Image: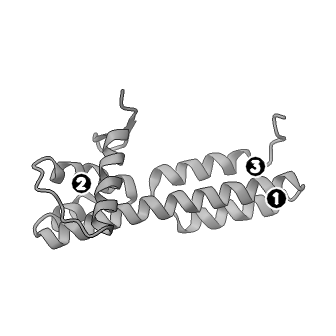
Amino acid sequence: MAIRHVRTGGSTVTSDDWRKVIDLGLALANGADLPQDPEMPELLRRMAPQVGMTRAEADAALSRAADTASLVREIHRRTREGTYRLGRAFGASDSLKASGDRAGARKVLEDAMAVEVVPLYRAQLQAYLDHVDEPDDT
């Protein structure tokens, strides 16, 4: 069963969509060509807003194969870098919070938020920020 992420603008993106774009990005990084898939344009149009790009940017990139490959690489890059950024920020924030440095924990999250473009990741950072001053549940 695919997990659904509903975004504003009416497009629904599933966990399968995320996986497909990640797999496409990995394939391109390993020297493969983009497959000729009639569903790819709509997948990329759905995914672009999920990583802070507009559908117009996706549409423009879909006009040429080289531009489409660049779009896939950019979506993959934003997903990969955002994932790493969140992991580092959450780990550092948790460590600082555990040592009693809540201001430092907040600063790490704010710094990550300042550069993050992926709306889902921004929401996760905001959720962490909203609770950084609360005591741990342990």
State how far apart marks 1 and 2 are (Cα). Answer: 38 Å
How far from the left and from the top, in percent, is residue 113? 58, 62
Question: Looking at the image, which residue is at 36% across and 31% down?
Answer: 2
Identified by mark 3, the residue type is Val
- For the N terminus, give its image quadrant: top left
In primary-sequence order, the first of circles 3 and 1 is 1
Question: Looking at the image, which residue is at 29% across and 61% down?
Answer: 27
Residue that numbered label 1 is attached to? 96
- Is the residue 59 above or below the residue 119 in the image? below
Residue 65 lies left or right of residue 43; in this view the side is left
* Residue 132, numbered circle: 3
How far from the left and from the top, in percent, is residue 9? 30, 44
Question: Residue 110 lies in what quarter of the image?
Answer: bottom right
Question: Looking at the image, which residue is at 61% across and 50% down?
Answer: 126
Identified by mark 1, the residue type is Leu
How far from the left and from the top, in percent, is residue 54? 29, 60
Identified by mark 2, the residue type is Leu
How far from the left and from the top, in percent, is residue 25? 32, 61
* Residue 44, numbered circle: 2
